[in-house]
Amino acid sequence: MLSVLEVDVFIQASQILRRVSLDVGEREVVCLIGRNGAGKTTTLRAIMGYLRPRAGRIALRGQDIHGRPTHEIARLGVGWAPEDSGIFPGLTVAENVLISTWTRPAGRPGPERVELAYRIFPVLRRYLDREGPEMSGGERKMLSIARALALDPELLLLDEPFEGLSPAIIPGVSEGLAQIAGLGRAILIAESNIYHVPPFATRLYVIERGEIIFAGRPDAVYDDAATMRVIGGAA
């Protein structure tokens, strides 16, 4: 579904990504693990069109998407939930979810997509008329993912979905992601904490200083002593 091949990304004069390659197949849940500043967010932002690679290729279902505007990539079926949630603070919960159906009008009917978002994160039904600043950090994370899901994407990009959440909130978010994966949506999760990798993840990449240093099954990383020294204490 998604192929990132030997991508280099610079921000001003600084090279952030160096020949980064990764793949996300149909129905896969893939995790990109790395310490803060390792290049996780830059990778996701390059896929989503916020950053333009200087070299390499990014393709969705075999179609090049690098260099395309972000709104075009979204309309091709890529949903995005950024690390800071990125919800519109002046809009209510209901309006934040609904706006995705306008962004990508094709696909399933809008009401069906909105209903699915609330079915995955039912707690949001309590706050339909609340605006972003009136919600907790965990609720904003759920809303960000629900809004991305209402786009009706084939692929979801989730940047640090568990970052900063209380232990009481993490199971609800994890269960929501498990349900989304069960629907057959492909998911790429960027996380700084190896212990936040969900049990249903199918593949794992580790990035350090802008380079992929591990690619394989999630359980295999624990047998790689060198990689675990890099990420074992990440948080």
Image (cartoon, helix red, strand yellow):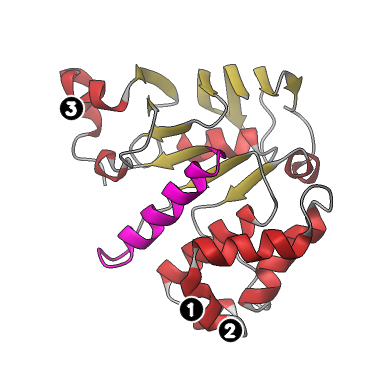
Q: Amino acid at mark 2?
A: Arg
Judged left or right of residue 113, residue 28 is left
Do the CB atoms of the residues marked 2 and 1 lie less than 8 Å apart? yes
Disc nearer the start of the sequence (2/1): 2
Spatial CA distance of label 2 from label 1 is: 7 Å
Q: Residue at x 80, y 51 (%)?
A: 104
Observer able to see residue 86 = no
Observer able to see residue 224 = yes
Disc nearer the start of the sequence (2/3): 2
Q: Position of residue 20 (x, y in %)?
A: 51, 19
Q: Is residue 144 magenta?
A: no
In the picture of the structure, the residue carrying the numbered disc 1 is 135
The quadrant in which residue 222 appears is: top left
Q: Which residues are magenta?
A: 164-186
In the picture of the structure, the residue carrying the numbered disc 3 is 229
Q: Position of residue 175 (x, y in %)?
A: 38, 55
Q: Position of residue 227 (x, y in %)?
A: 24, 22
The quadrant in which residue 204 appears is: top left
Q: Is residue 180 magenta?
A: yes
Q: Nearer the viewer, mark 2 or mark 3?
A: 2
Secondary structure found at label 2: loop
Q: Amino acid at mark 1?
A: Met
Judged left or right of residue 146, residue 233 is left
In the picture of the structure, the residue carrying the numbered disc 2 is 130
